[in-house]
Image (cartoon, grey):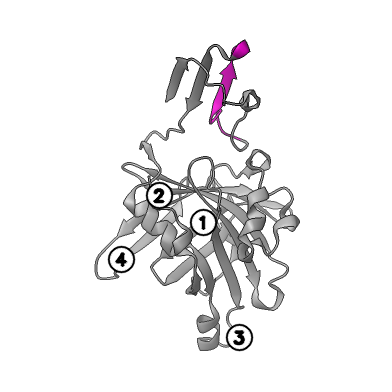
Amino acid sequence: SRFVLVGAIPPWLPLDLAGRGSAQGHDPYPFILFQAQRIWYYFEFSVPIWAEGRVVNHHPDLIQFAQWLAGTFSNGEQVAANPGRYGQIELIFRPLPQGFGGCLGFYGEQAYAYAVERPYRQVVHRLLWRDGVGIEVENYRLPAAAEYVGAGLAPDRLRSLDFSTLIHKQDCSMVFRRETGAAGDRFVGQLQKPKGCLVPWQGRETYLVSEAVLTEHTWTSRDRGFDPQTHQQIWGSDLGALEFTKGQSFAPEIRTDP
């Protein structure tokens, strides 16, 4: 949906805001145009719309999800209970101190415990609540990822992120829905577009199947790649999901004000 606002420009509003947009792959958000001499202004901005739901950025479930996600995680207990079956992996989900385009944002890092200084996955997430759908987690790639290695434990370094340079991983968003019942209070997630998230692997194309469950103290995930033609599994664990336990919490860094 699109909104337009016209009126007099206050003298303190800088003109150099004209033309700023959001991360790659999004409609202007916001896009601002000005007429000369600060006489009139014209604001036009687009709110991203998904056919199934209206975007709301401070739903209570979204805040709860973000607070549970914010922290460090390790599957060390799973490794100890199953010697030789799993590699020990360390995860970090650090809230972006500046947010992400008016939404909650995270920087994520994933590395083997013996090489935490060489993460094999770095990503920026933007979190959105969509009415009737749940929580959408968008994924963005950092072009200069090496500059941010270790920034999950040094969040001030994340303030230099230039969102206009991030590369949106199209069709790779996850959608989480809250479930309560015998299994307890949890968020269960899967890809927004099954078979739509393509991942290259050793020179061939695969589609990603990703499943995740978040609770207050745990993160469970399983990623697998399949051949688009035969639908046979090409990569990923045959031993089931990876089970992570939360270590340090960054929940206090999540803003709860609308």
Q: Residue at x 38, y 48 (%)?
A: 257
Amino acid type at mark 4: Asp
Q: Secondary structure at mark 1?
A: strand
Give the residue at mark 1. Answer: 209
Amino acid type at mark 2: Ile
Amino acid type at mark 1: Val
Give the spatial CA distance, label 2 vs label 1. 18 Å
Q: Is residue 255 magenta?
A: no
Foreground mark, 2 or 1, reads 2
Give the residue at mark 3. Answer: 84
Q: Residue at x 53, y 12 (%)?
A: 40
Foreground mark, 3 or 2, reads 2
Give the spatial CA distance, label 3 vs label 2. 35 Å
Q: Quadrant of the C terminus?
A: top left
| 230 sits to left or right of 218 | right
Give the spatial CA distance, label 3 vs label 4. 32 Å
Q: Residue at x 75, y 57 (%)?
A: 146
Give the residue at mark 2. Answer: 135
In this rendering, is residue 59 above or below 52?
below
